Image: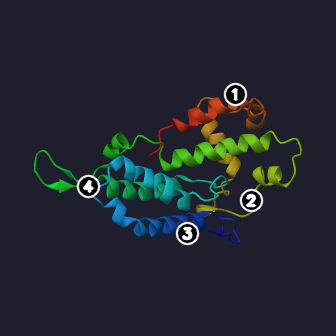
């Protein structure tokens, strides 16, 4: 369960390692997920309480790009299709896998990207309110060196927070000042949770 670090401080390998752990965990409980004796609600609870913790171990500091979000959603959709099974097409009568929109309708819990955003934003608020702004605070606002793909500046963890605030109508505001008000920050975290994730 250790964290995978690279010389470029990239979370790509870490996320890949976490999803591999989730796959291994899924295979270990495959007999439960495929059992006709268990309800879908129980299978969802197995996914949330047994499999997700392997994937989301120490994820509060992940800096997500759209590509990484997409990979995480693909993993979760694969899991949900195993849980809910195929669906019979009303027109052709053939069995087919559930589409992404159908999975969103039948899975009422927050999706994996919303969980990551919610917990990481809550943690950011906690760090911003620390009286002694030591190492954790400096890492939070740190500027990684080097370039990302296509010679773009590397995505910072703080950049994710600013993008989320912009989407909920608080762009341009100093998020560390907003975090000082616990109630207001909690409301912003809830608003981020409700953002549509592709």
Mark 3, mark 2: which one is toward the viewer? 3
Q: Position of residue 66 (x, y in %)?
A: 52, 52
Q: Which residue is mark 2?
A: 144
- Element under disc 1: helix
- Element under disc 4: loop
Disc 4 and disc 1: Cα gap in Å?
42 Å
Q: Is residue 94 or residue 28 the one in the foreground?
A: 28
- Element under disc 3: helix
Identity of the residue drawn at 47% across and 43% down? 197
Q: Position of residue 18 (x, y in %)?
A: 55, 65
Mark 4, mark 1: which one is toward the viewer? 1
Residue 30: quarter of image: bottom left
Q: Earlier in the sequence, mark 4 or mark 2?
A: 4
Q: Is residue 183 left or right of residue 30?
A: right
Q: Which residue is mark 3?
A: 17
Q: Is residue 73 or residue 146 the one in the foreground?
A: 73
Identity of the residue drawn at 69% across and 27% down? 184
Q: Earlier in the sequence, mark 4 or mark 1?
A: 4
Q: Which residue is mark 1?
A: 183
Q: Earlier in the sequence, mark 2 or mark 1?
A: 2
In the rendered structure, are the residues bearing label 2 and label 1 in contact, judged by CB atoms less than 8 Å apart? Answer: no
In the rendered structure, are the residues bearing label 1 and label 3 in contact, judged by CB atoms less than 8 Å apart? Answer: no
In the rendered structure, are the residues bearing label 4 and label 1 in contact, judged by CB atoms less than 8 Å apart? Answer: no
- Element under disc 2: loop
Disc 1 and disc 3: Cα gap in Å?
35 Å
Q: Residues within 10 Å of mark 4 (few under 14, many from 20)?
A: some
Q: Which residue is mark 4?
A: 97
């Amino acid at each position: 369960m250790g964290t995978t670090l690279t010389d470029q401080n990239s979370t790509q390998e870490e996320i890949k390692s976490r999803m591999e752990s989730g796959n291994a965990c899924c295979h270990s409980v495959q007999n439960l997920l495929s059992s006709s004796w268990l309800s879908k609600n129980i299978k969802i609870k197995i996914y949330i309480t047994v499999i997700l913790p392997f994937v989301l171990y120490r994820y509060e500091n992940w800096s997500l790009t759209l590509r990484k979000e997409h990979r995480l959603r693909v993993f979760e959709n694969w899991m949900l299709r195993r849980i809910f099974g195929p669906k019979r097409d009303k027109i052709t009568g053939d069995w087919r896998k559930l589409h992404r929109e159908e999975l969103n309708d039948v899975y009422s819990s927050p999706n994996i990207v919303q969980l990551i955003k919610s917990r990481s934003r809550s943690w950011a608020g906690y760090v911003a309110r620390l009286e002694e702004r030591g190492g954790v605070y400096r890492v939070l606002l740190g500027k990684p060196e080097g370039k990302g793909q296509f010679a773009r500046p590397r995505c910072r963890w703080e950049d994710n927070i600013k993008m989320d605030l912009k989407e909920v109508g608080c762009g341009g505001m100093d998020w560390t000042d907003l975090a000082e008000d616990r109630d207001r920050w909690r409301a912003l975290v809830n608003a981020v949770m409700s953002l549509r994730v592709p």
